[in-house]
Image: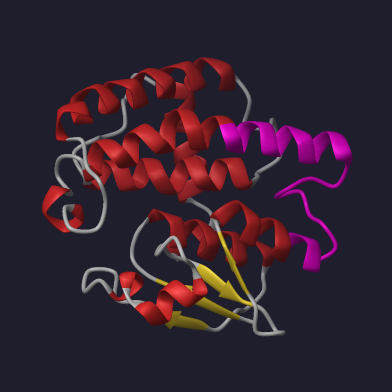
Amino acid sequence: MKLFNSIGPNPRVVRMFIAELGIEVPTVEVDLMGGENRQAEHLKRNPSGQCPALQLDDGNYLAEVTAICEYLDELQGGTNLIGTSPEKRAETRMWVRRIDLQIIEPLTNGFRYSEGYELFKDRLRLIPEAATDLKKLAQERIEWLDDQIGDKQFVCGDRFSLADIMLYCFLKFGDTVGQPSNPECKNIVRLMTLTDARESAKV
């Protein structure tokens, strides 16, 4: 296998997941800033022109963070990161989807349409007038998630999972692009602090 890696939160999710699994996957760097991900060679790996992409041993490619992570988890026989029972796997997938659609999508598009405009203007269709509302929407849903977490240690209770990794990587990204974490979201602050202390957070 081979991971086509780059800067940004999506590749970091996969690197962190790999670190949590305790496995090694060789990486190849893709120059995102230089637009290598939009060139023909990378589009063969991922027609969406995004990173990361995982080259399998048979030469085929997997893209999309959740698909890559679930595949790697299954190769290890299934772990708590996704879930070791149908109920736990469903719980993880439920929270991953909520975090992805309700927080990650508005957060990242809010960045692309504003601070990231110059980088993305020739690569994606951008809607600058939507940026402010998207950022507000992301913050509203972060506050909602804070309430949902309550006194749980992690998103899925006492089990560290892909949902936590995705939330962590994208909130850290938000901190660097003008969407800082809300210190009043005490439950998320606690989760982030716990995750900061994990060895996988260093990737």
**Which stretch did the figure color magenta?**
73-97
Quadrant for residue 114, please give it.
top left
Residue, far left:
118
**Left or right relative to 47: residue 64:** right
Nearer to the camera, 72 or 118: 118
Residue 29 appears in view: no
Quadrant for residue 77, please give it.
bottom right
Return the x and y of residue 178 as percentages of the image width and height. Answer: 18, 38
At 35% from the left and 71% from the top, the residue drawn is: 37
Screen quadrant of the N terminus: bottom right
Q: Look at the picture and state if 33 lies above or below 48.
A: below
At 48% from the left and 40% from the top, the residue drawn is: 167
Can residue 118 be found in the magenta stretch? no
At 32% from the left and 48% from the top, the residue drawn is: 173
Return the x and y of residue 186 as percentages of the image width and height. Answer: 43, 22
Quadrant for residue 109, please give it.
top left
Can residue 89 be found in the magenta stretch? yes
